Amino acid sequence: MMHHPEDRSATRALVSIVMPAYKLRYLDEALTSVVLQSYPRLELIVCDDSANASIEQCVARHALECPFPIRYFRNPARLGELGSKLRGIGLAQGEYIKFLHDDDVLQPDCIAQLVEAIERNPGTAMASSRRVRIDDDGQPLPDILATCFPFADDVLIDGPELVSFLADHTINFIGEPSCVLARRADLLALGNELMALNGKTIHWVGDLAIYVKLLRHGNLAMLASPLTQFRVSSAQFSQGGRDQPGIGDQGHEDLRQGIRQLGWRRETGDNRLVRVAPLSPHKARVFKPVDLVNALMQSAGMAERVSMT
């Protein structure tokens, strides 16, 4: 029996894009990148944390041209980023969750590539990709150590070994929440402790708290293409003292301590070494140890030229 292309799209897994929204300035650009996604089965969940109707009106305009459902919800009270994420996960109906912050931008094939990476590699807990930092005007910014891609091509990274690595080296090369795709069931299983480890909320690097809990149970598919643009706006940078030296140090320490307390840091061997396998269909799926610190430094070129923050 022959199947038409449209029949295949109906069998693809539904992906729910969860957007915590409270800033209008870049929302139009973020929503446009959602509407232009090539993946055929999507829904967008917008949890509006703002004080007026501007975001609702912007979402309504995009809903007129969007080929998939946009489900808008005004938060009954200010929930903040974490609360909006939790609400969005609960409202979502998809098999997968794709977070998108209201000032970030997805490339048109972002979701399609991330879904394929998870579904073609059994045992994969989450997928992410290289990302590009952009400024207020959408212009690319130089890489920092965390945004340098430490591999030559798409790879599969051993999840539990990466968690152990992060107990010593909290370098978030995995990406911000807008970069990643994960299963909704796995995120729901984390309950309200989404950004907590061992009962302690992790500040500044709360996204890593999510990732380490997911990666305890599966691998990370990491794609070399820059599929997300992560905005580093001047307002965001100075808000809450983000420009103060050492402001996030406690969050990094809490994350490292939490991983150790949970017994997720390996006690033998070199913790800089993490097993990595190529994702290419033209190469054998053989895991080999990679010194991740060295790989990141090499990808950054001369390390002293690259900011550690």
Image: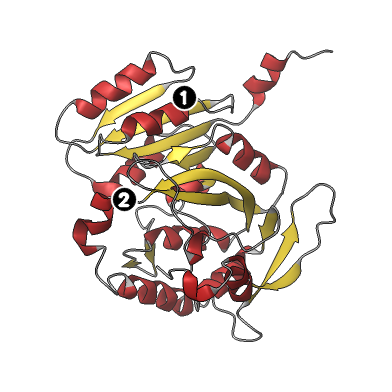
The picture quadrant where one finds residue 31 is top left
User: In this image, 8 relative to 44: left or right?
Assistant: right
Q: On the rendered image, what quadrant is the N terminus found in?
A: top right
Amino acid marked by disc 1: Val
The picture quadrant where one finds residue 52 is top left
User: In this image, 59 relative to 215: left or right?
Assistant: left
Give how far apart the Cα atoms at labels 1 and 2 are: 24 Å
In this view, the residue in front, 3 or 250, is 250
Indicate the secondary structure of the residue bearing disc 1. Answer: helix
Q: Which mark is residue 82?
A: 2
How many C-alpha atoms fall within 10 Å of the one at disc 2: few (<14), some, or many (≥20)?
some
Q: Earlier in the sequence, mark 1 or mark 2?
A: 1
Q: Is residue 230 visible?
A: yes
In this view, the residue in front, 149 or 1, is 149
Q: Against 161, is 49 above or below?
A: above
Residue at (65%, 22%) from the top-left corner? 9
| Residue 72 coordinates in the image, percent (x, y) | 31, 26
| Residue 139 coordinates in the image, percent (x, y) | 41, 44
What residue is pinned by disc 1?
35
In this view, the residue in front, 133 or 2, is 133
Circles 1 and 2 in contact, beta carbons < 8 Å: no
Residue at (46%, 57%) from the top-left corner? 142
Q: On the rendered image, what quadrant is the C terminus found in?
A: bottom left
Q: Against 97, is 218 above or below?
A: below
Indicate the secondary structure of the residue bearing disc 2. Answer: helix
As drawn, which residue projects farthest toward the left?
51
Mark nearer the viewer, 1 or 2? 1
Amino acid marked by disc 2: Leu
Residue at (46%, 31%) from the top-left corner? 33
